[in-house]
Image: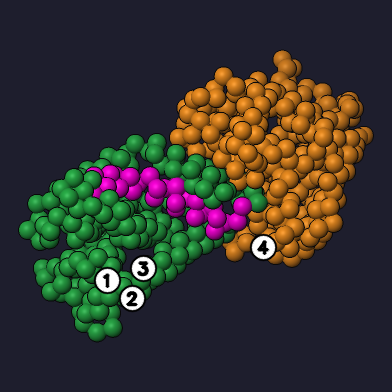
Amino acid sequence: MFISIDHVTKDFRRKPGALDEVTLDLPAGMIGLLGSNGAGKTTLMRIVCGIIEPTRGRVLVDGHDLSDRRARRTLKKTLGYLPQDVEPYPNLTPVEFLDYIGVLKGVTPRAERRRQAHELLDQVGLADASRRRIGGFSGGMRRRLGIAQAMVGGPRLLVVDEPTAGLDPEERIRFRTLLARLGGERTVILSTHILDDVAQTCPYVFVLRDGHKTFAGPTTGLVDEARGRTWLTAPQAAPPVDAIVVNATSTTRGTRYRIVTRTPPADAEPVDPSLEDGYMALATKETS
Amino acid sequence: MTLINAAGAHARITRRRVWLWFAIVPLTAFGALLAFVSPGAPRTGDTPDLVFTGQIIALFCGAAYAAAFTDFFASTSRRSMDEIEASTPVAPPVRHAALVLGTLGVVLVPSAVVLVGAGIWQTAAGHGAAVPAAIAVLGTIVLPSALIATCLSAFLGALLPHGVARVAAVLLWFGAVFSTPLIPLPTLNGTVLNLVGDTVAAGLYGAQPLYPRYAPTGPLGLDAATPRAAALSLAWQAVLIALLLTAGSSLARARNRS
């Protein structure tokens, strides 16, 4: 599936310019969508899913313009979407919930919906909870059920919005592994502000900031934004001025700062950049 | 088929909302008891008795539906369920119709039990067509008024904060259906726009309206107790349901996406 986002702008009454002239071509496979809160990630994903329409610009899926109702309907037949903070109907069991989503996605007959429901619950590790009501599920279990509902009908495009936010480390790693496994055969757009999730799973990434695209390319390319500019300072009392501090480690002799800057202190040593450094370097490049 | 299957899922969700039963079952029982002991009951032992029971139940249960369904649209959006549902190929009118049908299909069960039970009782007493008549009363009097009360509640819930909407919906419902000389306000009772089936009762079943003395005359009045007036009344109720549903769903969508 080939998705092309062409000069897309979205104005809301309370937030004009939520997206501003965003142009992107999305390749197949796992794609990370990075950006701070309010950068426009969720808006862009809702547009790609055909849930809302852009104010200007267009989205083409396999060459079909989503402004056309039939194209939107065709896309939705092959789409799985997991929004942020999903809370499925608490009175249903997971099997009943997935069956309902199967009905909406046009999966027939009932036996096939039930087969898919059990298979997906098995995949996301909820087979043992298949008879329990969703209302009693933990946050992690609800997220896993959320990804299962997105997978009903075998979608070619999977869009997931901050799926690991608020999960404990074990659940996060399990969820990340699951997403990476799903990405093999389809296009998966993973929106997050947890950089580690993207570093571990997405070979391609794009970055939004205040409604504008600031980077699109291989994840290694974003890391390269900080190459030659990432340093670890000697222990000292205060962080260097004119540098972006990525993290800090306390030692008995003071604090060592990991910084991104073009003008490092004399006693700083160069280190290999990470995705976090690249992201911060990009942010400083934009603001400078 | 999608509509029926999706309605089935919503019926299951509604069936498991325990507190709803605590509201609807006592009100239905109260309505049935009131219909049984009321001095205004026709006591003919056939269809007019069923019609009267249906109208009294519709009148009281309407208040329960008006109070219960202010979160009709919001309950899905709060959980991001509206986004998941909007990302599927099923059009919004079909999804909303499934929500309404599934919900109403369940909450009408107590009314159906009372009416069909009364129909069986009448059949045992020698009135042959009582059970089909009870089902007809359920479909033409109880169902439309339940739909209006639910959609009114949903609309107000999309427009106002839920607590305010709940009170407003119940007051509006009673204001629209209770005709009494103690409160000299114009109501819809006794008109072709009647929300608890007076026009339908008179036009289709030859029954007396609930409050004939206060019925206005003229084009909206009950002076034309004909099947045509009954059909007009049902058509009006269908339009009102569609308007409330569309307006409520549009308001809820606009609020979510602004």
Q: Where residue A109 appears, x then y in whole percent?
A: 63, 39
> In the rendered image, which quarter is residue B191 located in?
bottom left
Name the front one of labels 4 and 1. Answer: 1
Q: Could you tell me if residue B67 is visible in this image?
A: no
Hue used for the chain lettered A: orange
Residue corresponding to mark 3: B234
Kindly report the distance in space between the C-alpha atoms of the residues bearing marks 1 and 3.
11 Å
Q: Residue furthest top?
A: A252
Q: Residues within 10 Å of mark 3 (few under 14, many from 20)?
A: many
Residue that extends furthest to the left in the rendered view of this protein: B39
Cα separation, mark 4 vs mark 3, equals: 42 Å
- Camera-near label (2 vs 4) is 2
The span from disc 1 to disc 2 (Cα, nearest Å) is 7 Å
Q: Nearer the viewer, mark 1 or mark 3?
A: 1
Seen in the picture, residue B45 relative to A258 is either above or below; the reply is below
Residue A247 sits above or below residue A77 on the image: above
Determine whether the residue tagged by mark 1 lies in a helix, strand or loop: helix
> Mark 2 sits on what residue?
B228
- Amino acid at the residue labelled 4: Asp
To the question of a shared chain for discs 2 and 3, the answer is yes
| Amino acid type of the residue that numbered disc 1 sits on in the rendered structure | Gly
Given the image, on which type of amino acid does mark 3 rest? Leu
Q: Residue furthest bottom?
A: B218
Q: Secondary structure at mark 3?
A: helix
> Distance between the Cα atoms at labels 2 and 3?
10 Å
